[in-house]
Amino acid sequence: MAPICDQVYKNPSALVGLAREIRSLGADEDVGLILNKWVPFLRKGSLSMTIRELGHMGLPDRALQTFSWAQKQPHLFPDDRLLASAVEVLARNHELKLPFNLDKFTSLASRGVIEAMARGFIKGGSLHLAWKLIFIAKNSGRKLDTSVYAKLILKLGKNPDRHRLIGTLLDELGKREDLNLTQQDCTAIMKVCIRLGRFEVVESVYDWFRQSGHDPSVVMYTTLIHSRYSEKKYRKALAVVWEMEASNCPFDFPAYRVAVKLFVALNDLPRAVRYFSKLKEAGFSPTYDVYRDLIKMHMVSGRLAKCRDVCKEVEIAGFKLDKETMSKLLQLEMNTIKSQTSNPVSPFEWSEGGEVNNAENSESHDEDGISEPYMGMEFNSEEAAKTFHDEYARCLGFSPKVGQSSRSKPDGKPLLGSLYVAERV
């Protein structure tokens, strides 16, 4: 069994517990009241976790007091890990007093301490200071870990006013042969580069990650699809979808959403509908933009009944159609009505005895459950024509009406017919 001191100084639960005990101290009480009891069990590096935890608790003063106490313990200090933790906490909480000569500091401090300071500035939102520190260190011949660059790029990418600083960081990363980026770092850089239109960097980062022997996550795959979609390289984006399917990578909601958008852009209605169905079967609730894309797809195909079905889903989901989509949908309805009423007597031709002329066969022209009427459409009787008209009018949201009419041919024989009309409900 390991000595108790070994169990304590490496035990995260014990070291986090120390931070909690320190937090419970009164405002006038010193951290030594707690730490003095633990002196025999502590080793170099032990209190770095305690200091970081105090920083997470929003207690930078207590973190500094803990560091100051450790400095007086010969067996705990000097220790770069302890110093780095204290520097990061103070930088993150804007309580770090910067050395007057930052160039001299970066030439003397250890790489770990400089990186900790940079991470603290990044987490605390002092992005300009982090950027300055990184490039002072670079000019001093100190190469910081590339993950620090990635974290700064991610933060800068959220602020449009600071996008100009990202280009320099990306160029510097491109020169490095010692890249040490996690999948999260790579994905973060890719997302920022999409916003900047730096699609070539997206491809380079993805290629580097794959060549490093790693398998992309669904987030990375989705980011790559989104990049190629944004660049309008739809076929290349489609290749990534098939790669995901082939590797049995489970789709999350963003993956389904970008896949539907891609198939809409490719004018591939069957696959767009299929992936929309898969999205719902996986237990995800479509967002409004997914519904909107599907409606637009049906509108382009002239499938008014399908548009109405999706609109019902939109209403049930609690969304409201935007003005642009409403306007286009209304225009489609009006165009459909005009095409059916352009000839007052058509689409049904009249014959002697009131029967409908035989023109062409009446094969269905739609998949929506009711055929779209067309010139020369034939029926077995006038009643069948009326039934079809009533169903079609109701499908479009109109109230059907019938007006009787009769004419005479030149030879005196009657030409009978019915004029079918409709009005908005």
Image (cartoon, rainbow, N blue to C red):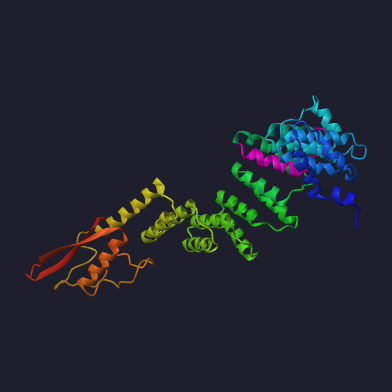
Q: Which of the 4 image quarters holds residue 367?
A: bottom left
What residue occupies the far top of the structure in this picture? 100
Q: Is residue 37 one of those drawn in magenta?
A: no
Going 31% across and 57% down the picture, which residue do you hit?
336
Lateral position of residue 288 relative to residue 35, left or right: left
Lateral position of residue 269 relative to residue 404, left or right: right
Image location of residue 305, percent across then percent down: 36, 61
Predominant secondary structure in magenta?
helix
Q: Can residue 125 be seen at all in this image of the molecule?
A: yes
What residue occupies the far left of the structure in this picture? 412
Lateral position of residue 150 relative to residue 317, left or right: right
Q: In which quadrant of the rendered image does the N terminus lie?
A: bottom right
Q: Which of the 4 image quarters holds residue 132?
A: top right
Lateral position of residue 110 relative to residue 201, left or right: right
Going 20% across and 71% down the picture, which residue do you hit?
382
Q: In which quadrant of the rendered image does the C terminus lie?
A: bottom left
Magenta residue span: 137-159
Given residues 219 and 44, the one toward you in this image is 44
Q: Can residue 109 be seen at all in this image of the molecule?
A: no
Q: Is residue 158 one of those drawn in magenta?
A: yes
Image location of residue 171, percent across then percent down: 71, 40
